[in-house]
Amino acid sequence: ISDDEFDALVRREEELEQKYPEFLHAWRIESGLDQTATRSGRIGSSLVSSSSSSSSSSSSSSSSSSSQSNDNTNTNTLISISIITEPKLDGVSLSLHYETKEEFSSIIDDDNDEVSLDLRWASTRGDGKIGQDVTATAKQISGIPLRIQLPLSSLSSSQLHNNNVNKTFAIEVRGEVVLPRSEFLRLQLEREEENITTTDNSDNTNKTVNSTSSSTTITSFSNSRNAASGILLRKDPKNPEEEQIQSNELRSLLQFYAYDISGLLQPRDNNRINTHRDEDDSTNLATATTTATKLNKDGTKRQSRSSSSPKSEYDWGDFDVDGCVHKVSEATIKAAMGYSMKSPKWAVAHKFPAQSAVSRLLDIVVQVGRTGALTPVAILEPVEVNGVTIQRATLHNFGHLKEILGGDNDDDKIPKYEPVLIRRAGDVIPQVIKRIQGSDVDVGVDKDKWISLEPPKSCPACGSPVTYDTSSSSASSIGQVTRCNGPPLLCPPRAVTSLKHAFSRDALDITGLSESRIQQLMDADFLRYPNDIFQMEDSKWGDIAALPGWGEKSGKNLRGSSEKVATNGITLSRFIFSLGIRHVGKHTSELVASSYGTVEAFLVALDTAAQENTESSEQYRPFPQLQNKLGIGPVMVESLLAFSKTAELSAAKDLAESLNVLEEDVVVDEDSSETDSLSTESTNKSNQPWKGFRVVFTGSLDGMTRSEAQRIAKQLGAKSTPGSVSKSTDLVVYGEKGGKKLEQAQELGVTTMYAQDFI
DNA sequence: ATCGTTCGAATGGGGAGCCC
DNA sequence: GGGCTCCCCATTCGAACGAT
């Protein structure tokens, strides 16, 4: 529901509470949170409700609870959580990695009271994927220290007595790179002026090779986030000194504000570096009132920038802010809450409402996706929203489309030029909100002026009949995805997007091949299967370079890219991901890869599956290795089975032939491949002391991550390794600082085991 | 002119675990 | 077993940048 609807509900609740105070929950009165909860909307209420659930059911596992402070005998114990609110800067996120020079052991031995960490590298996009390496630029950005000193006392005792003595000690600092608005405006003016003068010159002396700048006209920046991004990604200029200076100047305009420090920085005994405020003090960050925390540790004196702008560095009136972020400040609770794949779970963003505008619907076109999904897209009269022109917006599917545009009578068509309300969701994505009935344009009965809202009966690209995703229970057609049911490779848009997917960065990682280039190569008969790029004959590379839009350089680059992949090889999970099997994305590919280890094993499994009788009643029979894999269910197995029976299987085999597909190794974080010793263990069925157990891990397990431990438990026959303790739990393995779960286990009489014994 | 990348949200799904 | 939450998967949009 929209923020407006939510606020309306909150107001109604307030009214009801005043009218019937006898129904107020005890926690609302006690917590003192009720005011903020209603005022700040979602964030407040979601936190309140989660803490209320933990107090109402005695055995539920609240995320963390500071166990020392459980001296309160009240059954309605509330966990006190402090929330810090900061502005959400609109910039480019940056991940900084700092590492000690020496191994960890020597740091302790030297009787230092500080650890120094040096900036190793900086990359855009910190989570999971490695973004672009921008280390060189980052070193010149104001607010990014080259070295950080941390007091040893800030490290937890478990870290100090860690077994990993011969590892270096590293932390990751995440933050936002921004260009202050004043600088942005100044740059914009400068560029506009420069453009006027250069265009004036070029009118007369077009031929003169100008020495000051490249021949392309300098376009002015349109918004400060993109400008920051552009400056950040700008590479080191090779040639003239002049450009070098200009580049350095631009870089020095950027500023960095940290919002998260993670890695091995842990609280010690819950005292040191506990709340946000303490964290600030210990690393000499800004005070709590400054909102954006600035990482500005001494030791590295940044050259102070030109004092043209004497404003306070914490005056965020000079920054673009697109909302605010509410964060849990206690480090222990933050650590317990952890991260999802994309973002921390201890922070919630509350964004400013998006601007909306009115446009007109000109047409609805149907796009064909890689999996055959037919997606309706609205073609709109161009309108300006938040400084950009909107002309298209996805309508997701035909059920959703009808709900938005269907009108009062559930029409199956809509007149052209009908006004629609649109906005940019999150200030980025064009979105059609609703139809505004009552057009001032009368289109009459002209058939061309009416736009159909019905899904097509056949694929607009290849003419194959369509199917509708059958949702398991609901028979309603709302929201169903319409799909092209024909052979994927005979449907042009599907063939192109399949190849695009196979060459994408997370798959085979071939650069220089966009969708349009792939289309071009397919039309010219150079490309049909992914493997073709690796089997290209020498002469054909020349032919490609001769195609329109190509050149010697681009041809050579593409060839270089493919040869690099061929020689360096790719991991098994990337190989599997590149096949584009439905329901088998990046993560699932890793799961599958970790089940088979080698391509050979994987292909053999597909082969045997292909020969299986489809009528088999046992769901996992075609893929016994996947049976106990968490995260892989019947639909995925079905999808793999379907793939094994298509012609694409032989294409996959060819690809495996010409590529060096690497065995998965333990470098992968979660659910990584099996090491040799483990796989022999797993094949030895007799060695399963925990057969059928449900095993829960809690506390820190020396020497291994929790996911590693969970995997090993499964090797030992464990049935599942859930995250919390319940009645059905058979065994709890506890390490240092295992708090609540251990207590619960003892209450429930579940068997427990010390982590060292487990190891 | 093209390519790859960045920012972000919305849709409807599958898989898994927990509570009742 | 139904209801619910959380994570993962696929798909869509546009502007700006450096490099080519």
Image (spheres, coloured by chain):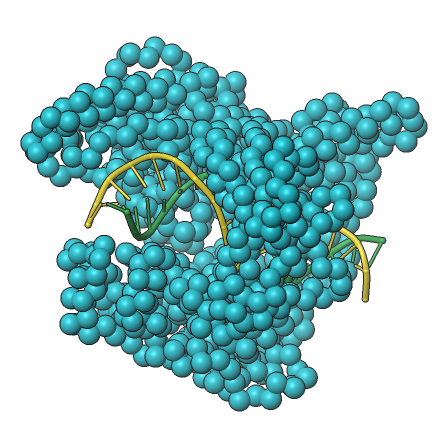
Chain colours: A cyan, B green, C yellow
Position above or below: A599 against A141? below
Q: Residue at x 71, y 49 (%)?
A: A411
Q: Specify the quadrant of the image occupied by residue A387.
A: top left
Residue A177 showing in the rendered view: no
Residue A166 showing in the rendered view: yes
Quadrant where the N terminus of chain A sits is: top right
Q: How many marks?
A: 0
Q: Residue at x 78, y 26 (%)?
A: A11
A517 vs A455, nearest the viewer: A455
A545 vs A173, nearest the viewer: A545
Residue A754 placed where, x, y %? 60, 59
Q: Is residue A388 left or right of residue A718?
A: left
Position above or below: A246 against A260? above
Q: Residue at x 67, y 73 (%)?
A: A692
Residue C3 placed where, x, y %? 79, 54
Position above or below: A524 against A622? above
Q: Residue at x 45, y 24 (%)?
A: A320
Q: Is residue A333 left or right of residue A237?
A: right
Residue A234 placed where, x, y %? 26, 37
Specify the farthest residue to the left: A208
A408 vs A551, nearest the viewer: A408
Residue A690 placed where, x, y %? 63, 72
